[in-house]
Amino acid sequence: MADFDIIVIGSGVSGMTFAAEASEKGKKVLVLEKEKRAGGCLCTMYHEDFWLEMGGHTIYSSYATYINDMKQANIVSRFLPRVKQPFKMLVHGSLMPITSVLNKLELAINGVKLFFIKKDGRTVRQYYSAFLGKGNYEKMFRPMIAAVISQEGSDFPADMMLKKRPKDKSMPRSFTIYGGMNQYIQKTADRPNVTLKTSCGAESVSRADGIYSVVTETGETFTAKSLVMSCQPAAAGGLLTDVAPELSSVLNTIPSAKVESVGVILRKEDVRPEPFSFIIAQDSDFTSVVSRDVVRDEKYRGLAFHFKPDRLDNDRKMAIIEEITGVSRHAFAAEQEVVHMCPTLSLGHEKKVEQIDTLLASQPNLYITGNYFGGLAIEDCAIRSRSEAARLS
């Protein structure tokens, strides 16, 4: 007899949303997470009663599905509207307004193309440089996209970037969660039918007599009728090599980018730059700095630096943070470093998604979820997981 009804591999928003949906249907769910903490790209850093987001930073009113999930998790009372703060761009070591790097003449010459060019079949670079102008794209829009997704996005499909989604008009345009965005993960893990095991990565998957078996890095074996892959696509592909080889082959063609993030919490009076929401680096070893200035605090300010991978050691990262903040490392109230992985999409990705769904139809009680089925937003996690959970028998 199986230990659980469902095993979910991966505890990010996608995996925990599926777990919540399955729990509502009375299923007994096990969630396996290889890291010490659950949440994937929802990672919150704490110091005293101050919190700082190290991964996902903002929830938008266009995240209607995810907002509904949070309402079901009873955390609406902790929704916290963001205070408006300016966006800045770092150019040759100087912070300036984003619009200051915009060539208005180039925009005027090319802008009319916006009404004629289609997103379908074009990369982000091809589509946006057509009506912004190549110079404006390279100097402003390319680093803006890289800052949003923490990786180079020029080769992404244009129709999967900055998508319009239905809005929950009862919500503020943008907000966060008092005490940290990872509370949705915690609330889901606390459900009676959900068991979460961290530091327990899946090492292999097999299937026999209608039952999936998952062997973990800790040497444990868990069994269930249904299996949910909610990890990075190539990781899912590796685990499904024997169970679903064709599916595995498609998943292995979807790469992921590493994001090295460093969070620092600083005494308010020490920080040199005026309050801001976001710093976009035009050309640097980091893509962005995201501030917690959008939620005021009397004592501290918090900054999350998202660095390009495999370039700098910790000391060099800290030197850049000291330079930007004007604060010496020994005066940091707290610091933390984490690594996230984020799927990388390219032209033709939609066909890969179609292949995955076609192959899934012939795999009994196997489900695959993640943000890469619709884009890279938190909302895409929720939409895909709800869609997959709807197939549960």
Image (spheres, rainbow, N blue to C red):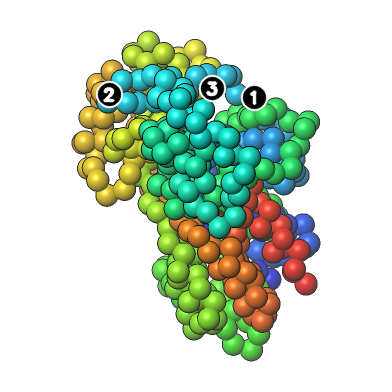
Q: How many marks?
A: 3
Q: Is residue 191 left or right of residue 342?
A: right
**Residue 109: image tag:** none
Name the residue furthest bottom.
209
Residue 336 in sight in this render: no
Which residue is found at the position 52% from the left and 19% from the top?
A: 85
Name the residue that disc number 2 marks. 93
Q: Are marks 1 and 2 in contact (CB under 8 Å)?
A: no
Other-residue count near label 1 (Cα within 10 Å), few / some / many at <14 / 14–19 / ≥20 = some
Which residue is found at the position 49% from the left and 42% from the top?
A: 130
Name the residue that disc number 1 marks. 81
Q: In which quarter of the image is residue 269?
A: top left
Name the residue that disc number 3 marks. 294
Q: In which quarter of the image is the C terminus?
A: bottom right
Q: Quadrant of the N terminus?
A: bottom right
Report the mark closest to the observer, 1 or 2.
Answer: 2
Q: In this view, does 29 lie to the left or right of 218?
A: right
Relative to 100, residue 248 above or below: below
Q: Considering depth in this image, is 262 or 345 the residue closer to the camera?
A: 345
Query: Could you tell which of marks 1 and 2 lies nearer the N-terminus?
Result: 1
Circle 2 — which element? loop
